[in-house]
Amino acid sequence: MTGLKDGSAKDEKGRQFNCPNCGATVEVALAQSKSITCKSCNSLIDLSAGIGGELRHAEQDEPVRPLIPLGTVGQLEGLAWQVVGFQHRMGQEPGDDEQFGWEEYLLYNARRGFSFLVDATDGWSLVKPVTGAPALASNGQSASYQGTTFKQQYAYKAETTYVAGEFYWQVQRGQKTDNRDFASGKQLLSMEQSRNEITWSAGAKIDSDTVAKAFRLEDQKDLLKRSDAAPFTAARSIGIIPIIVILIVILIVLSLLSRCSRCDPRVENCSSTTARSSGGSWGGSSSGGGHK
């Protein structure tokens, strides 16, 4: 692992060991874990060689606090999932100077294994690693999986910038991958390619209220809202044409009120509230009658 330091694991008791950076006790909860972070100093520790000897670690400055705390248990799709890991990642599309960020929560269920709850600016999604590689089109613009064709939405380079918790793979801070995101309605398909392997995951979008309810965070649901729950503006909710009509009506009424206030009963009939028109426009009559 790039940027890791060697350290000794002392006073090991079962699945516990001392952090090679600060000496605090680190407890490993999952047998599959190959990486873990120290809760005291946030160091990322490599467990791929076991915890009985030398441990390598990487220090992490400026920790990122997850909105859903590690250890939280939530109900999604009728199953209890525990948050065991958290990643903050940054992405950049080719030819674009701007970067964007998102978070991934690693969820664990004893019967179903692992899933990912993804928090991005365009909404939340729940995805799982797939068995069997989807078929990628020759032009790379679409992929097929289980009879569904997904169209490519984004292609970008991704980098892991912060991690916390336990992971079933060897996580590296600064690890870079080439990513492609595909979609078919609410169904999602993602491909992530590193120097050594290609991994696929599939899932679907979920709304922020579902996330808040699942993890009992209703009191923080405003913090969990994303663009999937963005309020509509007045123009989008009722349409621009009705607004224009309303403005025209207001202007006509104001014009008529202004005319009546200037009306001199000695020279004209002030009882009429409409202007005469030969064109049959709104508020007038081609027959000369008044609209009351």
Image (cartoon, rainbow, N blue to C red):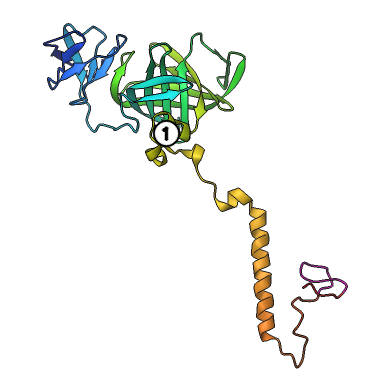
The residue beneath circle 1 is 212
Question: How busy is the neighbourhood of tag 1: few (under 14 within 10 Å), some, or many (20 plus)?
Answer: many
Is residue 116 a member of the stretch shown in magenta?
no
Where does residue 55 sit, x and y in percent of width and height? Answer: 18, 12
Left or right, residue 76 beside residue 57: right
**The C terminus, quarter of image:** bottom right
Q: Position of residue 267 (x, y in %)?
A: 77, 91
Q: Where does the image place residue 191, in percent across and percent down from the top left?
A: 47, 18
Judge left or right: residue 210 versus residue 145.
left
Residue at screen point 42% across, 33% down: 212
Front residue (pair 193, 86): 86
Q: Can residue 209 be seen here?
A: yes
- Extent of the magenta region: 277-287
Q: Is residue 278 magenta?
A: yes
For the residue pair 195 and 190, the one nearer the viewer reads as 190
Q: Position of residue 233 (x, y in %)?
A: 54, 50
**Residue at the spot 59% in from the left edge and 27% down from the top edge:** 185
Residue sitting farthest toward the bottom: 266
Q: Is residue 278 left or right of residue 200?
A: right
| Number of marks present in the image shown | 1
The majority secondary structure of the magenta stretch comes to loop
Question: Residue at horizontal 38%, vertical 39%?
Answer: 219
**From the viewer's perspective, is residue 66 above or below residue 265?**
above
Element at badge 1? helix
Query: Compared with residue 53, is residue 105 higher up or lower down, i.e. above or below?
Result: below
Q: Amino acid at mark 1?
A: Ala
